[in-house]
Amino acid sequence: MKKSAIIYGSFLAVLLILLRVLEYRFFIRDLSQEIYIAVIALFFTMFGLWLGHKLISRKKEVIYKTKPLEIDQDAIKKIGISKRELEVLQHMSRGLSNQEIADTLYVSLNTIKTHISNLYSKLNVDRRTQAVQKAQELNLLL
């Protein structure tokens, strides 16, 4: 009795598996085009997301100019800038006005204007921003 129950049970299990396989094959045949389209759409969606992520998240290279560790004394001597003119130039690079520089250095406004005029002629520039930029290029400022 046990033997026949095991045989019938095995036979029914094989029959059930066979029916599921046949049902699956019919299901695949009927919907094969839709399944292939879905797989291709999923592939291109994933590819598009990956590509979009790579294009958007590009790292920007930021190049920082490093400030010199010390002032180029040879350039100062070559140009002929005095110590006081160098102080005025440093205050100019910090964005101070003529009056603020005069107050900081305890000199008159006309003295500051004279120093700035001398700096313009020695650096061969016409404006404050040009003077500061040229001084940075020549390593005259920290």
Image (cartoon, helix red, strand yellow):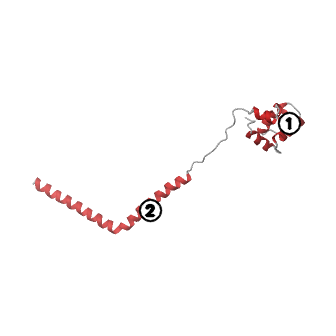
**Rendering quarter of residue 67:** top right
At label 2, the amino acid type is Ala
Q: Residue furthest bottom?
A: 30
Q: Quadrant where the N terminus lies?
A: bottom left
Residue 91: image tag: none
**Badge 2: residue crowd in 10 Å (few <14, some 14–19, many ≥20):** few
Q: Is residue 69 above or below residue 33?
A: above
- Identity, as a three-letter code, of the amino acid under mark 1: His
x and y percentages locating residue 63 in the rendered image: 64, 44
CA distance separating discs 2 and 1? 73 Å
Mark in front: 2 vs 1: 1
Disc 1 on helix, strand or loop?
Answer: helix
Q: Position of residue 5 (x, y in %)?
A: 13, 56
In the image shown, does 119 or 112 lie closer to the viewer? 119
- Residue 57 higher or lower than 70, as above or below: below
Horizontal side of 89 relative to 26 (left or right) equals: right
The correct choice, above or below, for 66 with respect to 9 in the image is above
Residue at x 38%, y 68% (from the top left corner): 33
Q: Are marks 2 and 1 in contact (CB under 8 Å)?
A: no
66 or 51: nearer the viewer: 66
Which quadrant is home to the C terminus?
A: top right
Q: Please state the horizontal and vertical placement of residue 16, each as a whole percent of the image.
A: 22, 61
Which residue is situated farthest in the left direction here?
Answer: 1
Q: Which residue is under mark 1?
A: 115
> Is 11 left, or right, of 111 in this rendering?
left
Q: Which mark is residue 41?
A: 2
